[in-house]
Amino acid sequence: MNREEKAESIREIEARLDTTDTIIAADFRGLSVLEISALRSSLREADAQMTVVKNTLARRAVSAKDREVLLPYLTGPTGLVWVHGDAAVAAKALDTFATSHQALAVKGGILEGEELDADGIKQLAKLPSRDELIAKLAGGVAAPLRGLAGSMNNMITGLARSLAAVQSQKASEG
């Protein structure tokens, strides 16, 4: 790799650092090309992308962009996972893959500027996705409203029945 190619590689990493809030570093040593391809495919489904980086170039880019939190994870064969969507979904995809492929080791990363070690990423993988949380919240808000609507409907139905009974009683008397 000549000097110009290295500078271009650093610029590419810097550009990704500017546009991504969640980055996860993983050691892919021991994975075959087919397994890495399968990992990349599962990450794409989670709206994330993995690139293999040269550590010395990544260190320069990370230092230039004030993301030094990543420096300890830039050792050995490193793949950086750039998360564009829900971080929990991407962490879940990585965790699922790591469970079935022991060679993949999640090192750590950053989530919206905060450092996460490997355990933190495992915890993140256990969280429900953003869509699941929204669905639970909507269900929690809707349940009392459904109950209130049902109660009001019962009250109106009861009032209508009472009025109908009074009307039929008056009609039979008069």
Image: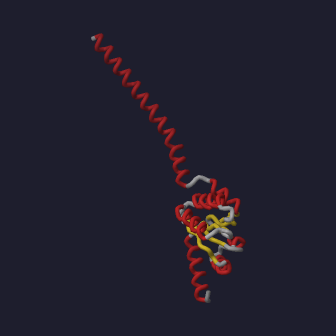
Q: Nearer the viewer, residue 110 or 101?
A: 101
Q: How is the image coloured?
A: secondary structure
- Seen from this angle, which residue lies furthest top? 173
82 with respect to 168 (left or right): right
In the image, farthest residue toward the left: 174
Above-or-below relation of 35 to 165: below
Q: Quadrant of the C terminus?
A: top left
> Up-down: is 69 above or below 8?
above
Q: How many marks?
A: 0
- Going by the picture, which residue comes out furthest to the bottom? 3
Q: Position of residue 150 (x, y in %)?
A: 45, 33
- Hey, which quadrant is residue 60 in on the image? bottom right
Quadrant location of residue 75? bottom right
> What residue lies at 52% left-to-right and 48% top-to-bottom?
135
Up the image or down, 45 lies above or below 157; here it is below
Q: Is residue 115 visible?
A: no
Coordinates of residue 144 in the picture (x, y in percent): 51, 38
* Residue 125 visible somewhere in the drawing: yes
Q: Quadrant of residue 49?
A: bottom right
Q: Please provide percent x and percent y for residue 87.
A: 59, 61
Q: Quadrant of the N terminus?
A: bottom right
- Whole-percent x, y for residue 173 in the image: 30, 10
Residue drawn 64% across and 57% down? Answer: 124
Is 51 left or right of 69, judged from the image as shown? left
Picture residue at 57% right of the left edge, 84% below the top: 8
